[in-house]
């Protein structure tokens, strides 16, 4: 503390008292089948960059190029450029920021990244940016079906978090969910989607947890008009709400309603979350009104079937994922 005072530092005795070391799992990966590499995980970027760089190198005959040959230095430089571009965008403390580690070090991803490598020319950091990483999926699935007689189903099924409770039932081959997270464990403590709750959704024997799943069918004059739904945790209800209003009130096509940037508010946190591409001028005006706005990753993966007045059917799979629509 003497030193802090002397240097006009801001670290207090309390800061030191509240600091605790965290024990983390080492990063472990194979290199060229014969080696297993163990290294430091996040929050050191080494735990992501090293496997990423080694896996990029593994795809090339680097051993033949020789130590500090033109070829090996060029190759390794380009690999380092690619990894550091990813570091700038994706890496940070996982306790605070969702880092797509699995994707970043996966072979399909690194092989795809290496398409930017030109063995004959130096790369250029202005044109080589971070890779495209689809957000690591959470585990809810939605689908809509309509048959030639006009019977419709809208189905949402959830494991809740990625891989649920990460337990595959031996011999049966399905995953157990982690739906207990959809209960409110105590007032004021949010679940993984930031939802708060109290006694109404407290854990009790035999009780079912509150969900946000909103598989929906809209009838017009008694006949199926829309079949709608999406995954997305707490954004499910607001996405379905927004999609219906877009179609029913703003007269948007199903495709526009699904694929235009979405927004979401869930009381707490008191923030309007918007997707990238949401109108900048609208954000400015909302901020002037006193709103807090935060741009976030994609909201939901909404699917819609719309039956037009002439009986023709329009089916839309959300462009945010690899969703698709098919007719038979
Ligand atoms: O039932 C619910 O509200 C949650 N289990 C849904 C989680 C979810 O949508 C995650 N997938 N995107």
Image (cartoon, grey):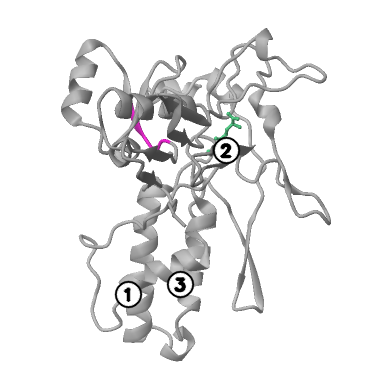
Q: Which of the labelled discs sits on residue 150, or is there none?
A: none
Would you name the residue on which mark 1 appears?
117
* Mark 2 Cα shell of 10 Å, populated few (<14), some (14-19), many (≥20): some
> Can the viewer see residue 160?
no
Image x and y of residue 96, in percent: 50, 34
**Which mark is on residue 56?**
3
Q: Secondary structure at mark 1?
A: loop
Q: Is residue 106 above or below residue 145?
A: below
**On the rendered structure, is 198 left or right of 236?**
right
Residue 232 vs residue 227, the one in the foreground: 227
Residue at the (38%, 38%) spot, across then down: 306
Q: Earlier in the sequence, mark 1 or mark 3?
A: 3
* Dot 1 or dot 2, earlier in sequence: 1
Q: Residue at x 51, y 68 (%)?
A: 107
Quarter-of-image position of residue 102: bottom right
Horizontal relation, residue 124 to residue 314: left or right: left
Residue 23: name its quadrant: top right
Q: Residues within 10 Å of mark 3 (few under 14, many from 20)?
A: many
Which region shows up in magenta?
294-299
| Location of mark 2 (residue) | 155
Q: In whole angstroms, how far apart are the C-alphas of marks 1 and 3?
A: 10 Å
Instruction: Using the image, determine if residue 311 lies above or below residue 328.
Output: above
Q: Residue at x 49, y 49 (%)?
A: 100
295 is within the stretch colored magenta: yes
SS under mark 2: strand
* Label 1: few (<14), some (14–19) or many (≥20) C-alpha neighbours in 10 Å: some
């Amino acid at each position: 503390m003497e030193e802090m005072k002397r240097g006009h530092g801001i670290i207090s005795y309390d800061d030191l008292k509240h600091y605790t070391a965290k024990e983390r799992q080492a990063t472990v990966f194979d290199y060229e089948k014969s080696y297993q590499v163990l290294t430091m995980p996040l929050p050191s970027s080494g735990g992501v960059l090293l496997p990423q760089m080694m896996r990029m190198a593994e795809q090339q005959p680097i051993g033949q190029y020789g130590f500090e040959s033109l070829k090996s230095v060029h190759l390794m430089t380009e690999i380092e450029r690619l990894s550091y571009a990813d570091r700038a965008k994706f890496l940070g403390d996982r306790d605070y920021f969702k880092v797509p580690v699995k994707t970043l070090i996966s072979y399909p991803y690194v092989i795809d990244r290496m398409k930017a490598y030109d063995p004959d020319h130096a790369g250029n950091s202005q044109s080589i940016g971070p890779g495209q990483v689809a957000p690591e999926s959470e585990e809810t699935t939605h689908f809509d079906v309509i048959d030639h007689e006009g019977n419709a189903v809208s189905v949402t099924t959830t494991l809740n978090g990625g891989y649920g409770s990460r337990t595959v039932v031996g011999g049966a081959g399905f995953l157990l969910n982690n739906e207990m997270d959809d209960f409110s464990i105590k007032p004021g403590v949010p679940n993984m989607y930031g939802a708060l709750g109290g006694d109404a959704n407290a854990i009790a024997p035999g009780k079912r947890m509150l969900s946000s799943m909103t598989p929906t069918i809209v009838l017009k004059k008694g006949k199926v008009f829309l079949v709608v739904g999406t995954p997305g945790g707490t954004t499910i209800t607001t996405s379905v709400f927004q999609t219906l209003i877009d179609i029913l009130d703003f007269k948007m096509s199903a495709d526009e309603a699904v694929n235009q940037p979405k927004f979401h508010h869930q009381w707490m946190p008191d923030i309007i979350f918007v997707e990238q591409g949401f109108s900048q001028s609208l954000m400015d005006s909302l901020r002037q009104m006193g709103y807090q706005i935060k741009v976030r990753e994609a909201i939901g993966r909404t699917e819609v079937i719309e039956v037009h007045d002439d009986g023709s059917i329009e089916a839309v799979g959300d462009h945010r994922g690899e969703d698709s629509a098919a007719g038979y």
